[in-house]
Amino acid sequence: MDTIELRSRLAAILDDEEDASVNWIDIERRCLELAEEIRGREEDCPEIVLHYLCDSDIRGRDVAYADHQRDAVRRYVLTGEYDDSVAVPWWGCWGFLVLVGAGLAWLLLKV
């Protein structure tokens, strides 16, 4: 399956999922079928898409989670762009540098 077909099938699922009379059983079946077709070639598929295909049951229960996933997948469908990384806050980087610095200082003082 090429990227264009993947994006097209995802768009159809997204459209049906955002319908007021969504059939979650049908959505789950279609997501699992698409996931099965991708199996073995996951490296060619964005991680957000893999999560989306496996999480239809969660999206059916959690609106905020569903909105977040649909926004990310919709971006991929419309533009082909995606961001599978997790942003690290500035204080996380600062904390890491402090720990590394403290570890180096401790090592130098032991010598």
Image: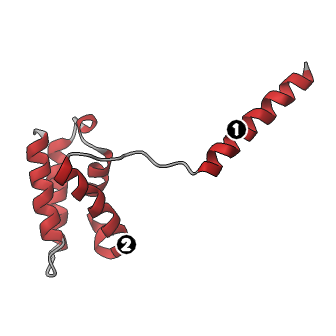
Residue 13 seen in the current view? yes
Q: Which residue is mark 1?
A: 97
**Image location of residue 74, percent across then percent down:** 22, 58
Q: In which quadrant is the N terminus drawn?
A: top left
Where disc 1 sits, the SS reads helix
**Image location of residue 109, percent across then percent down:** 91, 25
Q: Compare residues 21 and 30 and report the one nearer the observer.
A: 21
Q: Do residues under tags 1 and 2 come within 8 Å of each other at their CB atoms?
A: no
Query: How packed is label 2: few (under 14 Cα within 10 Å), some, or many (20 or more)?
Result: few
Q: Which mark is residue 25?
A: none
Instruction: Identify the residue shown where x is 18% and y is 42%.
Output: 38
Where disc 2 sits, the SS reads helix
Question: Taking 29 as reference, is 102 left or right?
Answer: right
**Image location of residue 6, percent across then percent down:** 13, 47
Residue 62 seen in the current view? no
**Image location of residue 97, percent across then percent down:** 70, 38
Q: In which quadrant is the C terminus drawn?
A: top right
Q: In the figure, 57 relative to 44: above or below?
A: below
* Residue at the outermost top position: 111
Precedes in sequence: disc 1 or disc 2: 2
Q: CA distance from mark 1 to mark 2?
A: 34 Å
Instruction: Identify the residue shown where x is 77% and y is 33%.
Output: 101
The amino acid marked with disc number 1 is Leu
Q: Compare residues 72 and 33 and report the one nearer the observer.
A: 72
The amino acid marked with disc number 2 is Ala
Q: In the figure, 105 relative to 19: above or below?
A: above
Question: Taking 77 as reference, is 96 left or right?
Answer: right
Instruction: Identify the residue shown where x is 18% and y is 47%.
Output: 36
Instruction: Identify the residue shown where x is 54% and y is 48%.
Output: 88
Query: How packed is label 1: few (under 14 Cα within 10 Å), some, or many (20 or more)?
Result: few
* Residue at the outermost bottom position: 20
Q: Which residue is mark 2?
A: 64
